[in-house]
Image (spheres, rainbow, N blue to C red):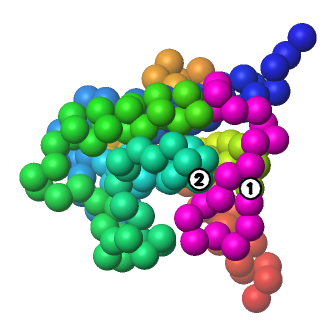
Amino acid sequence: MTDPKEDLRVYLQDARDVLLWKLDGLSEYDVRRPLTPTGTNLLGLVKHLTGAEALYFGATFGRPFAGTPLWITGEAEPDTDLWARADESREDIVGHYRQAWAHADATIAGLPLDALGRVPGAPREITLHRVLTHMIAETQRHAGHADVVRELIDGTVGQRPDGLNVAPYDPGHRDRVERAAKEAAARSS
């Protein structure tokens, strides 16, 4: 028999692990450098999710945890939670993320899925089930961002270091995709 709460926690943990392994083997510059016009970077994604876990699994259920203040809550300047200052170490940011998820896991373990909480500033209560679902989606979304950013840095892709969830690299694949895009565009003109 399965435990729905544990199933959800496992999916959240999987996404957390994916996000962190995207940092493995990279230089200090590579984990911090912005690779999109909006500044998306690997360490900033970790920092952001630290604040999200602290907010949703901490303050929401009356179990405060000192996470990264999120700009979306009005507690910080815009996007301050999405990048790492030069004086913030990778070790501290990753360590704080691990602490936030340990705190979150204690909240998950200690409350039933139908437990009600209130996200600070939100107009209505929300269940732990809804928070878990939200954080799985949020973390997987940012793990996807991290996958693209890591691919731009050094070509590493996939959900796991073993690469078993991605097709073997085919240098001609990108060219086939480009040709198909050009053919489709020509047909629609």
Characterize the local packing of mark 2: few (<14), some (14-19) or many (20 or more) Cα atoms within 10 angstroms: many
Between 180 and 105, the one nearer to me in the picture = 105
Position in image of residue 108 (x %, y %): 64, 32
Position in image of residue 59 (x %, y %): 52, 52
Between 167 and 74, the one nearer to me in the picture = 74
Mark 2 and mark 1 residues within 8 Å of each other at the beta carbon: yes
Q: Amino acid at mark 2?
A: Thr
Characterize the local packing of mark 1: few (<14), some (14-19) or many (20 or more) Cα atoms within 10 angstroms: some
Q: Is residue 119 left or right of residue 123?
A: left
The magenta segment: 108-125
Quarter location, residue 112 = top right
- Residue 159 seen in render: no
Residue at figure coordinates x 74%, y 60% from the top left: 125
* Residue receiving disc 2: 60
Please tell me whether residue 120 belongs to the stretch shown in magenta. yes
Magenta stretch, overall SS:
loop
Which mark identifies residue 126?
Answer: 1
The Cα atoms of the two marked residues, 2 and 1, are separated by: 8 Å
* Above or below, 87 relative to 27: below
Choose the circle earlier in sequence order: 2 or 1.
Answer: 2
